[in-house]
Structures are given as structure tokens and as C-alpha cells.
């Protein structure tokens, strides 16, 4: 990416890409879901948070 790329133009390019490739929206969503679940598990560290 060039230094002149602004967040607005980057956001619109992502929207354009997903509009052209609708199946990738599901892939991106699933990847983010799995990564967030893995992060929660890693953050717990096997600790038991209960009574």
C-alpha cells in the first residue's frame, strides 16, 4: 500500500472487493469468528472462573 492510502479509500476497496466476491464475505466472517474464539480461549489460560 502506498503512504497516500487513507482509511476511507481502504474501506471502500474492501467493500468493493466483497461486493465483487460475495462468498468471501462468509469466509472473512468465519475466520474472524474462529480467531475471536481462539483468542478468548488463549486469554483464559485454563483458569477456572467460577464459584
Image (cartoon, helix red, strand yellow):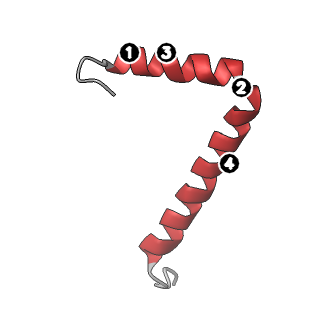
Give the Cα distance between marks 1 and 4: 24 Å
Which residue is depicted at the point 69% across and 43% down?
A: 27
Give the Cα distance between marks 3 and 4: 21 Å
- Marks 3,1: beta carbons within 8 A: yes
Give the Cα distance between marks 3 and 1: 6 Å
Give the Cα distance between marks 2 and 1: 20 Å
Q: Secondary structure at mark 2?
A: loop
Closest to the observer, 14 or 46? 14
- Marks 1,4: beta carbons within 8 A: no
Q: Which residue lies under the disc numbered 3? A: 12
Label 1 environment density (alpha carbons within 10 Å; few <14, some 14–19, many ≥20)? few
Quarter location, residue 20: top right
Q: Which residue lies under the disc numbered 2? A: 21
Position of residue 43 in the picture relative to residue 34 (left or right): left
Which label lies toward us, 3 or 4? 3
Which label lies toward us, 2 or 1? 2
Closest to the observer, 48 or 19? 19
Q: Position of residue 6 (x, y in %)?
A: 31, 18
Q: Which residue lies under the disc numbered 4? A: 30
Which label lies toward us, 2 or 4? 2
- Marks 2,1: beta carbons within 8 A: no
- Marks 3,2: beta carbons within 8 A: no
Give the Cα distance between marks 3 and 2: 14 Å
Q: Position of residue 47 (x, y in %)?
A: 46, 84
Label 3 environment density (alpha carbons within 10 Å; few <14, some 14–19, many ≥20)? few
Q: Which residue lies under the disc numbered 1? A: 8
- Please determine whether, in this image, residue 10 is positioned above or below residue 29: above
Pointer 1 or 4: first along the chain = 1
Amino acid at each position: 500500500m502506498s503512504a497516500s492510502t487513507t482509511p476511507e479509500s481502504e474501506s471502500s476497496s474492501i467493500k468493493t472487493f466483497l461486493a465483487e466476491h460475495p462468498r468471501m464475505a462468509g469466509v472473512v466472517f468465519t475466520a474472524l469468528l474462529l480467531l475471536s474464539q481462539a483468542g478468548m480461549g488463549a486469554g483464559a489460560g485454563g483458569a477456572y472462573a467460577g464459584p
